[in-house]
Amino acid sequence: AGEAHVEDFDFSFEGPFGAYDVNQLQRGLQIYTEICSACHGLKFVPIRTLADDGGPSMPEDQVREYAKQFEVFDPELDDFREATPVDHFPASSLDNAPDLSLMAKKRAGFHGPYGLGINQFFKGIGGPEYIASLLTGYEEAPDCAPEDFPGSYNKVFAAGGIPDSCRDEEGHSTVTGSWIAMAPPLAGDDVEFADGHEADVHHEAMDVAAFLMWTAEPKMMARKQAGFAGVIFLTLLAVLLYLTNKRLWASVK
Ligand code: HEM
């Protein structure tokens, strides 16, 4: 596998107090629906969760309408039928396109240095950064590659094929990234956002990456709130225990 460079995008949900941007999640859902869902599935995500707080927060009647565009197989009917909010999103329709439900937690954007993981400590694991970088990472193939080499050259994708002509004598890759079987899905202005938000490749990539972070970690807001409440509670408890300790031993001193 080749080396790859992942850009550190600034997402609203980073840090201990970061939160999902509802408008961004809705834009990301639109990109997933209009573009990515042609090949990729989200089979672990129940459609009804689109109405959940801390997610895209869509009104329930809209979620019901939204669900109707998907077909799911119903074992009771032994036939396909329109999806309803209780169904999950369909699985990938293209065999070699991976399911995206958990992709943002499956990939790491940042590593090292020297295997120490310090970059992850400061920048985060980098799953959404990896996805956004991958979508903006397509470039003209380097000169060393034959023109008919299968796939598209992507400077962020590390797990794809690399032509022998782009390797040195020891077999190490001389290029950044590798060739991916997914043609560039975003070209800019691929969707028209209801909120008039910019739809250049950079913004679209960030929006869909944020949405995929939500599909992979839909309870992030609740988790951060519980963690914060826990820290406050423990701080208070520590103060009380300290004072109790002082008072208990006061007569002995
Ligand atoms: C792989 C995202 C659209 C076909 C992937 C991967 C991601 C991704 C994150 C995994 C890369 C990895 O393994 O590290 C997206 C997003 C899309 C999109 C966010 C929409 C904006 C599409 C479309 C197609 C497609 C429309 C089909 C025409 C594939 C295939 C792979 C792949 C075949 C496997 C590539 C390989 O392993 O070489 N995609 N994708 N994707 N995608 Fe997409």
Image (cartoon, grey):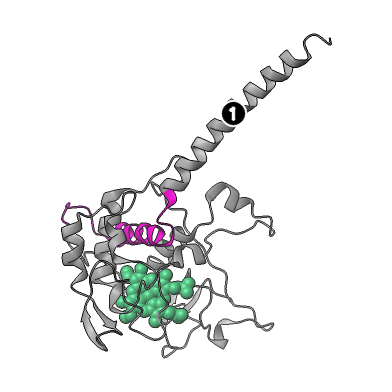
Classify residue 240 as left or right of residue 246: left
**Of residues 29 and 126, the one drawn nearer to the viewer in this rendering:** 29
Q: Give the range drawn in magenta.
A: 193-220
Say which quarter of the image contains residue 189: bottom left
Q: Position of residue 41 (x, y in %)?
A: 35, 75
**Of residues 76 and 150, the one drawn nearer to the viewer in this rendering:** 76
Q: Does the magenta stretch include residue 48?
A: no
Q: Mark 1 points at which residue?
A: 235
Question: Residue at position x 64%, y 78% from top?
Answer: 172
Ligand 1 resides in the quarter of the picture at bottom left
Classify residue 151 as left or right of residue 80: right
Question: Residue at position x 24%, y 59% from top?
Answer: 199
Q: In this view, does 215 lie above or below 54?
A: below
Q: Where is residue 186 in the image (x, y as percent from the top left)?
A: 30, 69
The residue lying furthest to the right in this view is 253
Say which quarter of the image contains residue 216: bottom left
Q: Position of residue 83 (x, y in %)?
A: 23, 74
Image quarter in which the N terminus is found: bottom right
Say which quarter of the image contains residue 164: bottom right
Q: Where is residue 146 in the image (x, y as percent from the top left)?
A: 46, 88
Q: Is residue 219 above or below residue 91?
A: above
Q: Does the residue labelled 1 lie within 8 Å of ligand 1?
A: no
Question: Could you tell me what secondary structure mostly forms the magenta stretch?
Answer: helix
Question: Residue 183: in sight, yes or no?
Answer: no
Task: Give the residue type at disc 1.
Answer: Thr
Q: Does the magenta stretch include residue 218?
A: yes
Classify residue 5 as left or right of residue 84: right
